[in-house]
């Protein structure tokens, strides 16, 4: 047997193969993106992680505005009675609501003589910190809409929300998270359905072109719907342990929330009608998804379009007498690069002047996943070239490129990395999305070959399906899998025989384990 | 006696002179910027108001990044014990804390057979919704800092915060508000003091150049300091009822919070030292300030740099056969304008195609404070010109400008409006900032001439001062005035005699009534 080569001390331990969930935590730690806080289930998003969120926000926000939406802001607190207006809705969120019951603190002397701050000023009606804002925004819409002329209302909110998670996982499932929630109201059912579909397409485009995630799009089964929705559309990503992540949802709410909140208008015929509403959202979960989809055993790998920094310039200054010239050249290069654009935005470039051993500094940036690293030393200066390393290529590959050529081609290099990540993720997904015909094969597909690594299993199972919600429950209990979506497209509408019930089925669905 | 001319029905009722506080509410209502919500003291910021906040955010954020700061995000909830770590801090905020005590809801059957959702899952330790984040960010900084090499930490957070206000006023004092809070940690006292001063300069520059607010800068008296700070610097604006608004603060926190949170590092000498910290913030209060400073009896007046839209184009389409040509010309003009820049940003231009009577539509935009209105009708098309109205000029003034010339000069027109607002506010402030020598004059200055309009009084009183905190208390009780700041600059350091105590004084201070 051949011995595995010694791993460099600087790579991530464990590897993806060894223990995927722990690898994920270590990638986040090594890249300095975020950390758990002392508040249960809540994270601190550090500058390297928050920079990604800022890029996601700015780029998505542009897409929302291009499709006619405006931003607004609604209260963080929701009166308990509001949440209760829609029965399915409150039932869906009741178990994870943070409840505000008091509005002041008072110093109270304890028996041991010490002083403790205790809540006082009890509220007549408690408030819930928004887990989502349909009910509070619905109340505003009810005030704003009088006639069909006031429709459509196309509103988005960037905000924090809170869902008291019992098993938090950084970025993927945290008690507090950052998101955007779109809320729209329409005159007709058709318009609302079109909006629901349009925003799913925006998410799909954004996931593919900005995050390099080749997501499936489709509809959720009734069992997996948003509480209170008539239908929930979703984008589903596959990550490297072959599990699914629901990365974004777009809900058609019918007239459920407009009825509950009283969003009524005088229609063209003069009759009072209830509006048709939608809601749609993506969150900081997207960051967890891209980490799990693209990163490797050396650390984070970032799609250039959303990378906090796209290029880091590393001055190599072995000798004091050439040091200033090298530093000046680095600053000049940074300036020249920042004047160039990639995907409509100025290049994001940082010069790392820290006086650290070259290897240490280089490894730090590898683990942070910066797409391009550029080294400049005294000899490069003489030659008028720079050493360029791509994060998506082998660690020892370096290209020596004339400086001016690099300035000209940097955007192309970033685009090559972006396209390469998408291509690799697509190949991976397609390799692990398998047509499965019968129950035994389905069970084998989802049974880990190695009991110690339950995360290594088949992937996405494409099956003929005509089962019920109870059948889904049974499969989840047995194998930990759920229907991720009923994908869109004619190719998924082949008649067949349900692999589980043996009944005739009209379409295929995708089962997977999911985060 | 001459009769006052009849007021147009479309202007704001009441006027500023008639009843300033109510005028303020009506300007907000008429411009559709924001409204009170059903959550006590919390507002809904509507798109026209939120657009201003987006511009403020983007522009300030650029200034923070230019001065080396990075954004990050910290938990919304603060463990009660954290808040209590700094004694003055918790005392300062205890009376206005929203407290989370439970983490789920449960349906409970009532005696009358109905079902009610009640809080359950009581927390072992309650959380407070952040009124400000010194303590939770301090805990993170304590983890992040080990050596002097890790300093300075220069962090900013854009977030919502909550302070349970007993007398809320939209934008100016709301239970929940949006803000940014900068938090920095430094190796030395000098560096932290320099940061505190630098960020105040950033605020002053932003207020002057972006919001057209000629603010006073200075230090707060000890009585008005942020709870836990060693010193608090501020910018103070004067609004049209001659009251002051504290529009931004920058705090030097000394080692108070680093000691409370354990932000310790190994210094250059090898000894363990506590870091020196600062914090600084501005909020959605800035929007209230600019409304009160610039608006008039016809409604909102917006400084162009932060206006949600800078230009609105109003197609005038009296005849069906020329309608399409007019609409096309409006779209073409909008496109040409959007390709131009003002103050480094593309012009923000909207075409209002709504089929409303011209007067109604025009008045709507006047009340919304859009800096430039452009009308295009069939006759303008023939002449190749447009009718341009400036919000800062008389309502009936219209300039007819060749279309191409307007495209060329739009940015200059906006800059003229921006500069004009600043000049007007400066003249107003200087006219109502009065040197006052003795107590009787001071009392007259702050006593309303008309008891029915307590808001009409002198303005900012500049006085020689050598009083104590108790003297400040007494003056606040007697006249409702406070020291707004000890302004910076040598001109404020003239020796004299305290107008109140008769003692020798080393400097002047500014007293005013304040929001």
Image: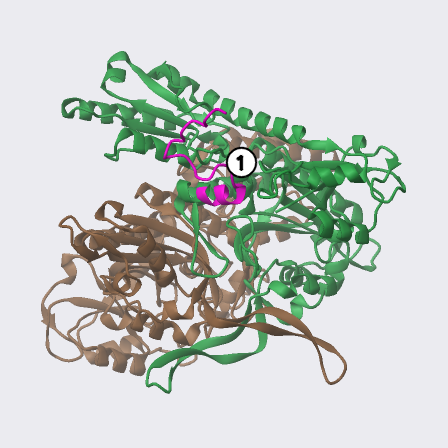
Chain colours: A green, B brown
Range shown magenta: A1-26
Q: Residue furthest bottom?
A: A111
Q: Is residue A57 magenta?
A: no
Which residue of the protein is positioned furthest toward the top in this rendering?
Answer: A383
Report how many numbered discs are placed on residues in the image: 1
Left or right position of B462 against B105: left
Is A285 rendered above or below residue A167? above
What's the residue at 42%, 22% (across, down)?
A: A410
Residue A111 falls left or right of residue A485: left
The structure residue drawn at horizontal position 21% and vertical position 67%, both measured from the top left corner, is B509
Q: Quadrant of residue A201?
A: top right
Instruction: Find the residue positioned furthest to the right.
Output: A504
Q: For mark 1, does the 10 Å Cα neighbourhood hold few (<14), some (14 to 19), or many (20 or more) residues?
A: few
Residue A199 appears in view: no
**Is residue A9 highlighted in magenta?**
yes
* Residue B385, above or below B154: above
Can residue B139 be seen in the rendering of this structure? yes
Give percent across and percent down for residue A11: 41, 34
Q: Which chain does tag 1 point to?
A: A
Relative horizontal placement of residue B44, taking residue B93 as reference (left or right): right
Q: Quadrant of residue B453?
A: bottom left
Could you tell me which quadrant the C terminus of chain B lies in?
bottom left
Residue B415: x percent and y percent?
A: 39, 42
The residue lying furthest to the front in this view is A1
**Residue B261 percent location from the top left of the image:** 31, 62
Residue A406 at x, y = what percent? Answer: 38, 18
Q: Pointer 1: what residue?
A: A17
Q: Main secondary structure of the magenta part?
A: loop
| SS class, disc 1 | loop
């Amino acid at each position: 047997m051949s011995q595995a080569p010694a791993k460099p001390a600087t790579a991530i331990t464990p590897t993806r193969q060894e223990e995927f969930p722990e690898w994920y935590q270590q990638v986040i730690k090594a890249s300095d993106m975020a950390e758990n806080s002392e508040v249960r289930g809540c994270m601190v998003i550090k500058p390297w992680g928050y920079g990604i969120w800022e890029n996601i926000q700015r780029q998505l926000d542009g897409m929302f505005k291009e499709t006619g939406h405006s931003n607004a802001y609604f209260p963080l607190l929701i009166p308990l009675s509001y949440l209760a207006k829609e029965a399915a809705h409150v039932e869906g969120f009741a178990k994870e609501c943070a409840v505000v019951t008091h509005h002041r603190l008072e110093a109270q002397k304890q028996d041991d003589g010490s002083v403790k701050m205790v809540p006082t000023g009890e509220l007549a009606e408690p408030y819930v910190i928004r887990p989502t804002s349909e009910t509070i925004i619905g109340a505003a819409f009810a005030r704003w809409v009088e006639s069909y002329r006031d429709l459509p209302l196309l509103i988005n909110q960037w905000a924090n929300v809170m869902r008291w998670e019992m098993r938090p996982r950084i970025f993927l499932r945290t008690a507090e998270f950052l998101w955007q929630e779109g809320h729209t109201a329409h005159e007709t059912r058709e318009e609302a359905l079109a909006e629901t579909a349009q925003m799913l397409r925006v998410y799909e485009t954004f996931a593919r072109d900005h995050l390099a995630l080749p997501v499936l799009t489709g509809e959720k089964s009734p069992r997996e719907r948003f509480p209170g929705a008539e239908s929930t559309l979703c984008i589903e990503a596959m990550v490297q342990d072959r599990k699914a992540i629901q990365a974004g949802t777009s809900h058609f709410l019918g007239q459920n929330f407009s009825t509950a909140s009283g969003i009524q208008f005088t229609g063209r015929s003069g009759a009072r009608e209830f509006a048709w509403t939608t809601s749609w959202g993506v969150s900081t979960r997207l960051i967890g998804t891209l980490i799990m989809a693209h990163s490797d055993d050396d650390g984070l790998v970032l799609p250039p379009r959303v990378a906090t920094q796209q290029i880091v310039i590393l001055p190599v200054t072995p000798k004091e007498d050439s040091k200033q010239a090298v530093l000046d050249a680095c600053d000049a290069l940074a300036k020249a690069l920042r004047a160039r654009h990639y995907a409509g935005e100025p290049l994001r470039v940082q010069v790392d002047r820290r006086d650290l051993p070259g290897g240490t500094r280089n490894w730090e940036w590898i683990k942070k996943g910066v797409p391009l690293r550029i080294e400049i030393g005294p000899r490069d200066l003489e030659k008028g070239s720079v050493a360029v390393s791509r994060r998506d290529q082998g660690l020892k590959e370096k290209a020596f490129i004339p400086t001016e050529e690099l300035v000209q081609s940097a955007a192309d290099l970033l685009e090559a990395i972006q396209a390469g990540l998408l291509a690799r993720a697509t190949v991976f997904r397609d390799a692990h999305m398998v047509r499965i015909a019968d129950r035994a094969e389905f069970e084998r597909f989802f049974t880990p070959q190695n009991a110690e690594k339950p995360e290594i299993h088949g992937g996405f199972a494409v099956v003929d399906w005509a089962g019920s919600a109870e059948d889904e429950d049974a499969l989840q209990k047995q194998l930990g899998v759920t229907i991720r979506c009923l994908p869109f497209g004619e190719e998924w509408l082949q008649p067949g025989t349900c692999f589980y019930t043996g009944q005739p089925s009209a379409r295929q669905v995708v089962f997977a384990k999911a985060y």
